[in-house]
């Protein structure tokens, strides 16, 4: 039986984080880039840093100063860093922490830094619309997962997550048709921006684990 990685991202509230931690998932994502409406505020950071969490924590950053990333990493004891912007190989490696690197998939040919991908613990495929990278709540064309040769080496040899507009209505189609190694969900399991719906979270996980079995 193969097991699909599940990452629940954009967690802002303590009760959402604790509930997500109780589910059969693999990663909890916390966003620290101010461009996102799911960015964790300084006040909330203090609150959630005191929680006892058992699942690996992923801190999501986007082209931010090294000092800021290190500050958050130390406060939260992050297990992984996720870089969602145009960060260089040297930058990503400098933190001596396992990292996830985003590959942005839009209407034009996908550009991949092979050295960066090979250094990453995982790659994240996410939707890009114009200049908006991630957080679109929109799927990219999933046929890219089998038709885009630039993605094939990653898919065949590396660990990866598919993000962008995943929800309860479309997830089964993605699983059955493309059998991705992992999934990253955020807006599709919310009742409002940044506020997770616990029933949707549980149903999402159940759909994936039923497929796995």
Image (cartoon, rainbow, N blue to C red):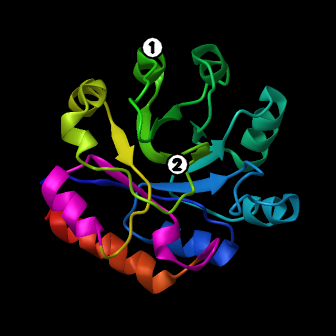
Task: Write down the residue under mark 2.
Answer: 129
Residue drawn at the location 69% of the way across and 65% of the way down: 51
The residue lying toward the viewer, choosing from 96 and 157, is: 157
- Nearest to the observer: residue 208 or residue 131: 131
Give left or right: position of 7 versus 13. Answer: left
Q: Is residue 109 magenta?
A: no
Q: Position of residue 3 (x, y in %)?
A: 23, 53
Label 1 neighbour load within 10 Å: few <14, some 14-19, many 20+ = few
Inspect the magenta stretch and tell me whether residue 173 lies in it. yes
* Element carrying mark 1: helix
Q: Is residue 87 left or right of residue 117?
A: right
Residue at (61% x, 65% y) in the render:
11
Which of the marked residues, 1 or 2, is nearer the chain's N terminus?
1
Badge 2 local density, few (<14 within 10 Å), some, or many (20+)?
some
Circles 1, 2 touching at the beta carbon (< 8 Å) = no
Distance from the alpha carbon under mark 1 to that under mark 2: 25 Å
Q: For mark 1, what is the residue?
A: 115
């Amino acid at each position: 039986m193969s097991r699909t990685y599940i990452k629940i991202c954009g967690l802002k509230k303590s009760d959402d984080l604790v509930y997500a931690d109780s589910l059969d998932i693999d990663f909890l994502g916390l966003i620290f880039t101010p461009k996102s409406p799911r960015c964790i505020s300084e006040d909330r950071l203090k609150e959630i840093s005191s929680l006892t969490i058992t699942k690996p924590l992923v801190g999501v950053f986007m082209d931010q100063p090294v000092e800021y990333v290190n500050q958050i990493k130390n406060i939260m004891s992050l297990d992984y860093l996720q870089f969602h912007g145009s960060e260089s190989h040297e930058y990503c490696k400098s933190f001596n922490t396992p990292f996830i690197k985003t590959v942005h998939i839009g209407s034009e040919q996908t550009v991949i830094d092979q050295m960066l991908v090979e250094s990453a613990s995982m790659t994240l495929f996410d939707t890009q619309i114009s200049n908006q990278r991630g957080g679109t709540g929109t799927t990219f064309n999933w046929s890219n997962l089998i038709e885009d040769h630039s993605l094939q080496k990653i898919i065949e040899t590396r660990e990866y997550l598919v993000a962008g507009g995943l929800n309860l209505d479309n997830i089964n189609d993605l699983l059955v048709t493309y059998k991705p190694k992992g999934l990253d969900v955020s807006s599709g399991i919310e009742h409002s921006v940044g506020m997770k719906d616990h029933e949707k979270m549980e149903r999402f996980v159940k759909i994936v684990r039923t497929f796995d079995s």
